[in-house]
Image (cartoon, helix red, strand yellow):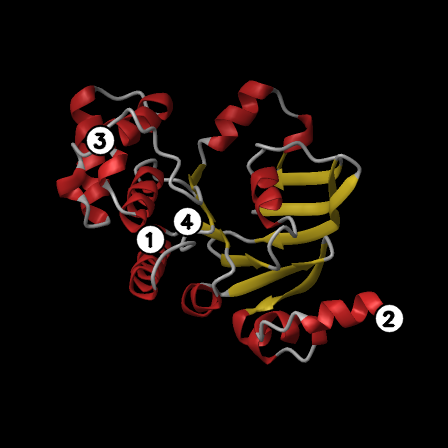
């Protein structure tokens, strides 16, 4: 379980997150949505301890991130797998080496076992034949698949996705959505996605948390999201930029 209580975060006197509170239960698949620059990725990185919050608390499985040592935080991160927006692959390493590096840091197993895990994870995302390729040889969609393979290779309890379908065409977006659903259902991991793709929210998520003006504007089921009468939620879903402009004038 992840409990976020009254957290706030600012950069250079600009407050990005304001008094955010919610709980994500084990096994849930949750999308975090909202306008670009609203703080979605900041929130995701705060949950894993990559960013330090200014106030409030984040608790993962009853462990408060504010009050643990760096080593304990590293140990806690072993429960997480993260798929970064642009793949975050090392250009100088092959696909196999990129995945192997993460495994070597986390697992105390021999090279043969690591190689077996790498090939299994690549097979899961239909990328087994790319193990000796360099990132420069891969398309954007292929890099996303490798990023997912690297994350699932660690058998995480929590899967975090930062804009997993950004920059992909509709067919590849659908393919990535199906992969996320597959691993969520198969592995029982808790899944949290930052996304602006409403198709991803519809097809994959059970629940959505929408941020607006640094606060939680909506928190409910995906079905409730698309039926919401909240004018801010409706404007976001409809892509209506005039609502924000009118509000600022008022």
Earlier-in-chain disc, 1 versus 4 = 1
Q: CA distance from mark 1 to mark 3?
A: 20 Å
Q: CA distance from mark 1 to mark 2?
A: 46 Å
Classify 99 as above or below 207. above
Dot 1: what SS?
A: helix
Q: Are marks 1 and 2 in contact (CB under 8 Å)?
A: no
**Label annotation for residue 96:** 3
Q: Are marks 2 and 4 in contact (CB under 8 Å)?
A: no
Q: CA distance from mark 2 to mark 4?
A: 45 Å
Q: Quadrant of residue 245?
A: bottom right
Of 24 and 232, nearer the camera is 232
**Label annotation for residue 183:** 1
Dot 3: what SS?
A: helix
> Which residue corresponds to mark 2?
250
- Residue 144 x/y as whole percent: 33, 46
Earlier-in-chain disc, 4 versus 3 = 3
Earlier-in-chain disc, 1 versus 3 = 3
Of 119 and 141, nearer the camera is 141
The residue that appears at 29% across and 31% down in the rendered structure is 99
- Residue 28 x/y as whole percent: 49, 57
| Mark toward the viewer: 1 or 4 | 1
The residue that appears at 64% across and 46% down in the rendered structure is 3
Q: Are marks 1 and 4 in contact (CB under 8 Å)?
A: yes
Q: CA distance from mark 4 to mark 3?
A: 24 Å
| Mark toward the viewer: 3 or 2 | 2
Dot 2: what SS?
A: loop
> Which residue corresponds to mark 4?
189
Q: Are marks 1 and 3 in contact (CB under 8 Å)?
A: no
Q: CA distance from mark 1 to mark 4?
A: 8 Å
- Residue 219 x/y as whole percent: 64, 64
Q: Is residue 106 left or right of residue 130?
A: right
Q: Are marks 4 and 3 in contact (CB under 8 Å)?
A: no
């Amino acid at each position: 379980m992840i409990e976020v209580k009254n957290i706030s975060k600012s950069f250079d006197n600009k407050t990005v997150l304001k008094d955010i509170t919610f709980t994500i239960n084990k096994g849930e698949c949750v999308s975090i949505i909202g306008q670009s620059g609203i703080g979605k990725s900041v929130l995701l990185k705060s949950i894993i301890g990559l960013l330090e919050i200014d106030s409030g608390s984040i608790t993962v499985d009853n462990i408060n991130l504010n009050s643990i040592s760096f080593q304990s935080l590293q140990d806690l991160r072993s429960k997480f797998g993260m798929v970064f927006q642009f793949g975050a692959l090392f250009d100088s390493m092959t696909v196999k080496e990129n995945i192997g590096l993460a495994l070597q840091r986390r697992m105390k197993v021999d090279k043969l076992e690591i190689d077996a895990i790498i090939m299994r994870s690549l097979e899961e995302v239909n990328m087994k034949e790319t193990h000796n390729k360099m990132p420069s040889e891969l398309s954007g969609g292929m890099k996303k698949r490798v990023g997912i393979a690297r994350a699932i290779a660690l058998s995480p309890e929590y899967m975090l996705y930062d804009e997993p379908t950004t920059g992909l065409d509709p067919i590849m977006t659908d393919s990535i959505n199906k992969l996320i659903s597959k691993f969520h259902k198969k592995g029982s991991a808790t899944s949290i996605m930052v996304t602006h793709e409403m198709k991803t929210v519809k097809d994959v998520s059970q629940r959505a948390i929408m941020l607006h003006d640094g606060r939680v504007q909506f928190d409910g089921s995906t079905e409730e999201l698309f039926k919401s009468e909240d004018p801010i939620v409706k404007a976001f879903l409809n892509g209506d930029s005039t609502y924000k402009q009118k509000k600022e004038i008022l």
